Image (tube, helix red, strand yellow):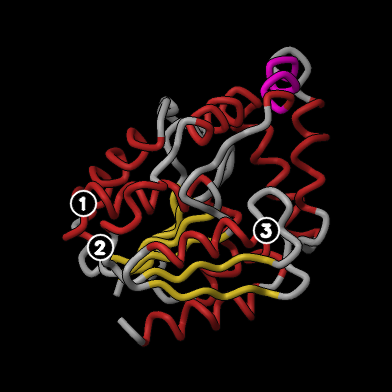
Amino acid sequence: MQLIFIHGSGGCKEVWKYQAEFFDNAITLNLPGHPDGNVRASIKEYSDWLHEFIQEQGVKDRVLVGHSMGGAIALRYALDYPNHVKGLVTIGSGAKLRVQPETFTLLEKALHKPALASEYINAAYTFIAPELRHVIQARDKENTPAALLNDFKACDGFDVLDNLSEISIPLLGIVGDKDLLTPPKYTRFLISNVKNGQELVITKGTHYVFAEQPKVVNQGISEFMQTL
């Protein structure tokens, strides 16, 4: 099975450092516009881009692992291309990802004052080890606030609440019990409404639980893979 890791809003492939080190031949990718190329305006467009990427790579027996927006992309992919994926793992994600209006207001200002975006997003990295946190922060600056704003708009327009029953692909939903951005209830709803879902709630984990507690997350993914 081929694991493909999809980062979240404004993110980068480097965020999956501990997963790339643990899983042999794992694919970690930068979505378009992060920073190279052009961002996509919707989750659907990101899903279509991912399908083209996978077809070009000739990857078979793929399992998609997506964080936050990446989880939304994985869900959209499963709906659009159900025969092209063996399993899904969402981390801190959900079937609907609304964004608060004040967040958009802040990021609009950050287009002219990038430090505002850094202050906003850096708070989410508090429990990530410094060696990785510094890499992620540097990559955030390369991607620019414009990419983050674009991705949040894409998330805000994402809603597959009424389509979850169509997903029969095995799905593991991972979430930290302290995740305030995408609370456990998001994952609980997701798992309860797909045909073959299981949940892993990680104690003291926040939105970036996979980077904070990689051993626990990697073990959970490994056990899930064994069931496929």
Disc 1 target residue: 81
Disc 3 target residue: 208
Residue at 79% in and 35% down: 120
Residue 59, quarter of picture: bottom left
Depth order, front residue of 137/179: 179
Disc 2 target residue: 85
What numbered label is drawn on residue 9?
A: none
Spatial CA span between label 1 and label 2: 7 Å
**Residue 107 colored in magenta in the image:** yes
Depth order, front residue of 79/34: 79
N-term mark: 1 or 3:
1
Characterize the magenta stretch by its predominant secondary structure. Answer: helix
Q: In this view, does 35 lie above or below 176?
A: above
Is residue 205 toward the left or the right of residue 155 in the image?
right
Q: Which stretch is magenta?
A: 103-110
**Residue 183 colored in magenta in the image:** no
Q: In which quarter of the image is the C terminus?
A: bottom left
Residue at 28% in and 65% down: 62
Residue at 63% in and 52% down: 182
Q: Do the residues labelled 1 and 2 touch (CB within 8 Å)?
A: yes
